[in-house]
Image (spheres, rainbow, N blue to C red):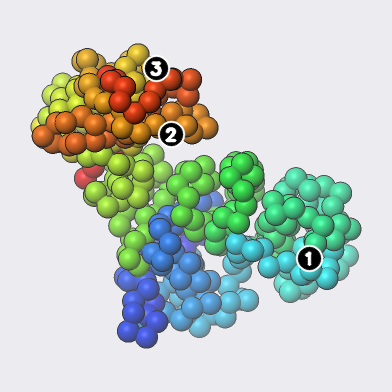
Amino acid sequence: MSLSVRDLTVHYGSFAAVRDVRLDIADGEVLALLGPSGSGKSTLLRAIAGLEPATRGTVNWDGEDLAAVPVHRRGFGLVFQDGQLFGHRDVAANIAFGLRMHRVPRAEHAARVRRLLDLVGLAGYERRRVTELSGGQAQRVALARALAPEPRLLLLDEPLSGLDAGLREQLAIDLAALLRRSKITALLVTHDQEEAFTVADGVAVLDGGEIRQEGAVRRVWQGPADDGVARFLGVTTFVDGVASGGSVRTALGEVALPEVGDGPVRLGLRPHALRLAGSGGAGSGVTGFGVAGEVTAAVHRREHLRLVVALGLPEMSTVDAVAPVTADLRPGDTVRLTLDPDGIAVVG
């Protein structure tokens, strides 16, 4: 069973919120729609669900055109950012609502609810009022309710964005494990790269209502299609170089990139692609002596010290870099940076 979207376009008046989108999601695959706010992600998901009318194009499930199929008959489960739970019902009643809507025999409800709560890590919460739940617990209940009727496709619209950072990270890990354990086909809408890469098998980068790039998570992360996609995926510096024999020579030094063919190459550097010389990282891939510069800003993050370094090179004036969180660096200090292949993307 699979989803196929062809040339899907959605207009709001004269404005095209989604343009000529083509997507395929295979049976058991989790695809993340990744893009900035206003890129058309939620509109596309709602059009697939049948909640938004398409101007043109098709949404097919196993070859069946769903244009004439109403939302409640598509067999899709929906989880939104706010969960949309019923505050006057307890946890079990919220989950059982999905079972009643799909006419599952009442005698099966209790066992199915217990199994789903165990699946989402909330065993024993049947009689808890939803108003007594934390944000993370409420989203787990919303997920259980969506899974209750055993949907053929699960649609998740920014399901973790309302949670604090630590809880969002843990719930993303739990969600990834749950989707793989249940082998359900899913489409996840998110603006959070870490969330997309934690949960999904593949990613489609959407911007301006158009798919800019689609592919396996690792391939998109390491090889963004253009500068715009690269910037959205965390690249802050671009540098041109020449590849030869598995390494690339640039104005910032030389770095081993065995998969890059010989010839001109454009590299996109995320902040951790430039590290303080001798500070670790993927040291086996770093060659040469790097480049010297002066620290103009230093900000402590959870796992590292984020630097802005002035280089004074004709090709670039400043770059972002990282140093160990214990490094004692201040504006005005001189540092030497080396390239780390773990933070490098090959653009285009």
90 vs 61, nearest the viewer: 90
- Disc 3: which residue: 280
Type of amino acid under label 1:
Asn
Badge number at residue 202:
none
Q: Look at the numbered discs 3 and 1 and tell me whether their residues touch, using CB distance below 8 Å.
A: no
Q: Look at the numbered discs 3 and 2 and tell me whether their residues touch, using CB distance below 8 Å.
A: no
Q: Secondary structure at mark 3?
A: loop
Q: Position of residue 99 (x, y in %)?
A: 76, 67
> How many neighbours does mark 3 have within 10 angstroms: few (below 14), some (14-19), or many (20 or more)?
some
Please report whichever mark, 3 or 2, sits nearer to the chain's N-terminal start.
Answer: 3
> How many neighbours does mark 1 have within 10 angstroms: few (below 14), some (14-19), or many (20 or more)?
many
Q: Position of residue 124 (x, y in %)?
A: 86, 49
- Judge from the rendering whether residue 194 lies leftward or rightward of residue 242; answer left or right: right
- Residue found at x 15% / y 28%: 251
- Disc 1: which residue: 94
* 249 in relation to 156, above or below: above
Please report whichever mark, 1 or 2, sits nearer to the chain's N-terminal start.
Answer: 1
Mark whose residue sits in front, 3 or 2? 2
Residue sitting at the far front: 332
- Judge from the rendering whether residue 101 lies leftward or rightward of residue 264; answer left or right: right
78 vs 239, nearest the viewer: 239
Q: Secondary structure at mark 2?
A: strand
Give the image quarter of residue 243.
Answer: top left
Q: Secondary structure at mark 1?
A: helix
- Disc 2: which residue: 299
Type of amino acid under label 2:
Val
- Residue found at x 17% / y 36%: 316
Please report whichever mark, 3 or 1, sits nearer to the chain's N-terminal start.
Answer: 1
